[in-house]
Image (cartoon, rainbow, N blue to C red):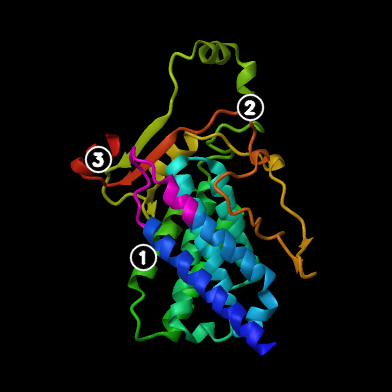
């Protein structure tokens, strides 16, 4: 039994190494440009599909071999990063929703917070800080205001806790991130009582507007690409998302309806163990389920969001 567990752990570590290697190749690929990088992303999604399924099916054995909860959280966090990067490249909001699903699962299952010894491990706490920052960004773009407030409180408390437990470490950058998110949410609060995105809950369906229907029937123009940039000094921003570009992103997208997204239920695995997909969909694929969005709505225009770009940077993105 012990030998079998060792083989399981070795296989898991090999899958992690392979997935991390592929992830490193696509992590810094620009989220713009005319040259398609989709083949690289297909490979990394496939690698994480295998890894995620393997750890689900062999969770008990891996835990016996010493697998930590934060390691599971790190895998889910990487998957969330992949989905978010695909959203930034394609503007397909289904990828953004999937990133939110995985991040929410990490939070609800306390993968980082519940890890034994994590409060004394600077590396694990750094991963947790990055997780909160990424989840905050996704929640902001999705207009999940309650989640943003909850995450912000947890994030501020975590930074303070890290400063207390790791006094020899400089957390100046994380303090700046805290200041940015507090300022961002304070300025944006109360700006809108409804989404800036076109939303079927508030807006008339486009097919019922005669002038819109005539415009689309003639197919004279299609809005396919947008370049969003901002140059003001001391802008209100979080990470590289300024308040101006955030609102422009909202205005250039169709609001997804929660009615179109169905979470998978708990299903038994081949070995009889239950695999809970209620917190994370497990759909690690470049082709997500079609019922996640309204098929009658057009696709969002692709957007390149740039923070204080140079002239050469703008030219590179534009052409």
Q: Which residue is mark 3?
A: 316
Q: Are marks 3 and 1 in contact (CB under 8 Å)?
A: no
Q: CA distance from mark 3 to mark 2?
A: 34 Å
At x 65% / y 59%, what residue is drawn? 280
Query: What is the number of callouts on the image?
Result: 3
- Quadrant hosting residue 48: bottom right
Residue 176 badge? 1
At x 67% / y 33%, what residue is drawn? 201
Dominant secondary-structure state across the stretch colored magenta: loop
Q: Which residue is mark 2?
A: 296
Q: Residues within 10 Å of mark 2 (few under 14, many from 20)?
A: few
Residues 284 and 223: in front is 284
Residues 14 and 77: in front is 14
Residue 121 appears anywhere in the view: yes
x and y percentages locating residue 83 in the rendered image: 51, 52
Q: CA distance from mark 2 to mark 1?
A: 42 Å
Name the quadrant of the N terminus. bottom right
x and y percentages locating residue 242 in the rendered image: 38, 48
Q: Residues within 10 Å of mark 3 (few under 14, many from 20)?
A: few
């Amino acid at each position: 039994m012990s030998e079998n567990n060792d083989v399981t752990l070795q296989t898991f570590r090999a899958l992690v190494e392979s997935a991390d290697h592929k992830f490193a190749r696509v992590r810094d690929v620009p989220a713009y440009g005319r040259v398609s990088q989709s083949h690289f992303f297909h490979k990394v999604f496939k690698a994480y599909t295998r890894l995620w399924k393997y750890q689900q099916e062999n969770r008990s054995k891996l835990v016996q071999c010493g697998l930590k909860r934060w390691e599971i959280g790190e895998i889910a966090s990487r998957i969330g990063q992949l989905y978010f990067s695909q959203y930034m490249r394609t503007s397909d909001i289904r990828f953004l929703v999937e990133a939110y699903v995985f991040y929410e699962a990490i939070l609800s299952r306390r993968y980082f917070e519940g890890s034994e010894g994590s409060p004394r491990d600077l590396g694990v706490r750094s991963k947790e800080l990055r997780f909160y920052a990424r989840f905050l960004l996704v929640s902001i773009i999705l207009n999940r205001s309650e989640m943003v407030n909850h995450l912000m409180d947890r994030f501020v408390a975590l930074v303070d806790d890290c400063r207390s437990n790791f006094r020899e470490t400089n957390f100046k950058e994380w303090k700046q991130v805290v200041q940015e998110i507090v300022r961002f949410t304070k300025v944006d609060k109360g700006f809108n009582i409804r989404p800036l995105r076109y939303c079927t809950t508030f807006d008339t369906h486009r097919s019922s507007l005669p002038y819109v229907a005539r415009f689309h029937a003639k197919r004279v123009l299609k809005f396919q690409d947008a370049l969003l940039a901002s140059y003001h000094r001391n802008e209100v921003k979080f990470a590289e998302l300024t308040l101006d570009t955030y609102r422009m992103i909202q205005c250039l997208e169709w609001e997804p309806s929660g009615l179109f997204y169905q979470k998978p239920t708990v299903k038994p695995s081949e070995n009889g163990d239950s695999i809970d997909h209620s917190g994370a969909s497990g759909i690690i694929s470049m082709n997500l389920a079609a019922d996640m969005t309204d098929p009658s709505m057009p696709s969002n225009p692709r957007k390149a969001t740039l923070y204080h770009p140079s002239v050469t940077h703008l030219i590179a993105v534009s052409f």
